[in-house]
Amino acid sequence: MTTDIKTLVKILIGVAWLDGDIQPEERRHLHQVAKEKGVADDLEIQPLLHELRAVKPEECYQWLRDYLGDRPTSETCQTLIESISALIYSDGTVANEEAKLLSRLQLIDSTDASEPFYSKTLSIIRKLYQRWLAEF
Protein backbone atom coordinates (compact mmCIF):
# COMPACT_ATOMS: atom_id res chain seq x y z
CA MET A 1 0.00 0.00 0.00
CA THR A 2 2.92 2.37 0.63
CA THR A 3 3.84 2.08 -3.05
CA ASP A 4 0.32 3.20 -4.05
CA ILE A 5 0.51 6.16 -1.66
CA LYS A 6 3.92 7.18 -2.95
CA THR A 7 2.75 6.84 -6.54
CA LEU A 8 -0.36 8.92 -5.83
CA VAL A 9 1.76 11.69 -4.26
CA LYS A 10 4.13 11.57 -7.24
CA ILE A 11 1.14 11.86 -9.61
CA LEU A 12 -0.09 14.94 -7.76
CA ILE A 13 3.35 16.51 -7.94
CA GLY A 14 3.46 15.69 -11.65
CA VAL A 15 0.01 17.17 -12.26
CA ALA A 16 1.15 20.36 -10.50
CA TRP A 17 4.14 20.50 -12.90
CA LEU A 18 2.08 19.94 -16.07
CA ASP A 19 1.69 23.68 -16.56
CA GLY A 20 5.45 24.14 -16.16
CA ASP A 21 5.37 25.69 -12.70
CA ILE A 22 4.06 24.81 -9.25
CA GLN A 23 1.86 27.55 -7.80
CA PRO A 24 2.33 28.52 -4.12
CA GLU A 25 -1.09 27.11 -3.17
CA GLU A 26 -0.30 23.85 -4.97
CA ARG A 27 3.05 23.70 -3.18
CA ARG A 28 1.39 24.04 0.23
CA HIS A 29 -1.21 21.45 -0.69
CA LEU A 30 1.41 18.97 -1.89
CA HIS A 31 3.47 19.36 1.29
CA GLN A 32 0.35 18.84 3.40
CA VAL A 33 -0.69 15.73 1.48
CA ALA A 34 2.81 14.23 1.65
CA LYS A 35 2.92 14.82 5.39
CA GLU A 36 -0.58 13.41 5.97
CA LYS A 37 0.25 10.32 3.89
CA GLY A 38 3.52 9.83 5.76
CA VAL A 39 5.80 10.13 2.74
CA ALA A 40 7.18 13.66 3.17
CA ASP A 41 10.54 12.27 4.35
CA ASP A 42 10.70 9.50 1.76
CA LEU A 43 13.95 9.63 -0.21
CA GLU A 44 12.12 9.22 -3.51
CA ILE A 45 9.49 11.88 -2.73
CA GLN A 46 11.71 14.57 -1.15
CA PRO A 47 13.50 15.80 -4.30
CA LEU A 48 10.17 16.03 -6.14
CA LEU A 49 8.33 17.65 -3.25
CA HIS A 50 11.03 20.25 -2.70
CA GLU A 51 11.25 20.97 -6.45
CA LEU A 52 14.89 20.01 -6.69
CA ARG A 53 13.99 18.84 -10.17
CA ALA A 54 11.03 19.37 -12.44
CA VAL A 55 8.73 16.50 -13.29
CA LYS A 56 8.34 15.87 -16.99
CA PRO A 57 4.86 15.12 -18.29
CA GLU A 58 6.01 11.69 -19.46
CA GLU A 59 6.98 10.81 -15.88
CA CYS A 60 3.60 11.90 -14.59
CA TYR A 61 1.84 9.84 -17.25
CA GLN A 62 3.91 6.78 -16.40
CA TRP A 63 3.10 7.15 -12.70
CA LEU A 64 -0.56 7.45 -13.62
CA ARG A 65 -0.37 4.23 -15.65
CA ASP A 66 1.46 2.50 -12.79
CA TYR A 67 -1.13 3.66 -10.27
CA LEU A 68 -4.18 2.70 -12.32
CA GLY A 69 -2.92 -0.51 -13.86
CA ASP A 70 -4.84 -2.26 -16.64
CA ARG A 71 -8.18 -2.46 -14.87
CA PRO A 72 -8.50 0.12 -12.14
CA THR A 73 -11.14 -0.40 -9.49
CA SER A 74 -13.85 2.16 -8.89
CA GLU A 75 -12.19 2.94 -5.55
CA THR A 76 -8.83 3.60 -7.20
CA CYS A 77 -10.46 5.87 -9.80
CA GLN A 78 -12.38 7.74 -7.12
CA THR A 79 -9.25 8.25 -5.01
CA LEU A 80 -7.46 9.67 -8.04
CA ILE A 81 -10.34 11.99 -8.93
CA GLU A 82 -10.63 13.24 -5.36
CA SER A 83 -6.89 13.81 -5.05
CA ILE A 84 -6.59 15.68 -8.34
CA SER A 85 -9.71 17.68 -7.47
CA ALA A 86 -8.22 18.77 -4.16
CA LEU A 87 -5.05 19.88 -5.94
CA ILE A 88 -7.01 21.81 -8.57
CA TYR A 89 -9.14 23.51 -5.90
CA SER A 90 -6.14 24.28 -3.66
CA ASP A 91 -5.66 27.79 -4.99
CA GLY A 92 -9.25 28.78 -4.25
CA THR A 93 -10.00 29.45 -7.91
CA VAL A 94 -11.47 26.89 -10.24
CA ALA A 95 -11.31 27.75 -13.91
CA ASN A 96 -14.04 26.51 -16.24
CA GLU A 97 -11.59 24.07 -17.78
CA GLU A 98 -10.72 22.64 -14.36
CA ALA A 99 -14.39 22.12 -13.59
CA LYS A 100 -14.81 20.42 -16.96
CA LEU A 101 -11.85 18.16 -16.21
CA LEU A 102 -13.40 17.02 -12.96
CA SER A 103 -16.75 16.39 -14.63
CA ARG A 104 -15.14 14.37 -17.40
CA LEU A 105 -13.06 12.33 -14.97
CA GLN A 106 -16.19 11.41 -13.07
CA LEU A 107 -17.94 10.29 -16.26
CA ILE A 108 -15.16 8.05 -17.53
CA ASP A 109 -16.14 4.42 -17.61
CA SER A 110 -13.13 2.55 -16.33
CA THR A 111 -14.41 -0.70 -17.80
CA ASP A 112 -14.30 0.53 -21.40
CA ALA A 113 -11.91 -1.94 -23.03
CA SER A 114 -11.46 0.13 -26.18
CA GLU A 115 -9.39 2.76 -24.38
CA PRO A 116 -7.86 2.22 -20.95
CA PHE A 117 -8.90 4.63 -18.19
CA TYR A 118 -5.43 6.14 -17.87
CA SER A 119 -5.30 7.05 -21.56
CA LYS A 120 -8.55 8.95 -21.28
CA THR A 121 -7.43 10.60 -18.05
CA LEU A 122 -4.10 11.66 -19.52
CA SER A 123 -5.77 13.11 -22.56
CA ILE A 124 -8.19 15.14 -20.44
CA ILE A 125 -5.44 16.41 -18.13
CA ARG A 126 -3.21 17.34 -21.08
CA LYS A 127 -6.03 19.28 -22.80
CA LEU A 128 -6.88 21.10 -19.58
CA TYR A 129 -3.38 22.38 -19.08
CA GLN A 130 -2.86 23.25 -22.73
CA ARG A 131 -6.00 25.39 -22.67
CA TRP A 132 -5.01 26.93 -19.36
CA LEU A 133 -1.59 27.85 -20.72
CA ALA A 134 -3.13 29.30 -23.88
CA GLU A 135 -5.21 31.71 -21.75
CA PHE A 136 -2.10 33.15 -20.15
Image (cartoon, rainbow, N blue to C red):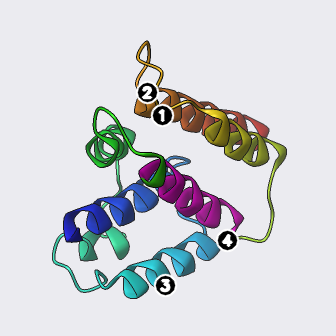
| Stretch of the chain drawn in magenta | 76-90
**Mark sitting earlier along the chain (4/1):** 4
**Mark sitting earlier along the chain (2/3):** 3
Element at label 3: helix
Horizontal arrangement in the rendering, residue 123 relative to residue 38 (left or right): right
Question: Which of the two marks, 2 or 3, is nearer to us in this view?
Answer: 2
The residue lying toward the viewer, choosing from 136 and 39, is 39
Crowdedness near tag 1: few (<14), some (14–19) or many (≥20) residues, C-alpha within 10 Å: some
Residue 32, numbered label:
3
Residue designated by label 2? 119
Amino acid on which disc 2 is placed: Ser
> Can you see residue 45?
yes
Element at label 4: loop
State the separation of the CA atoms marked 3 and 4. 11 Å
Crowdedness near tag 4: few (<14), some (14–19) or many (≥20) residues, C-alpha within 10 Å: some
Residue designated by label 1? 122
Q: Taking 36 as reference, is 74 above or below it? A: above
**Mark sitting earlier along the chain (4/2):** 4
Quadrant in the picture for residue 11: bottom left
Q: Is residue 81 a member of the stretch shown in magenta? A: yes
State the separation of the CA atoms marked 1 and 3. 24 Å
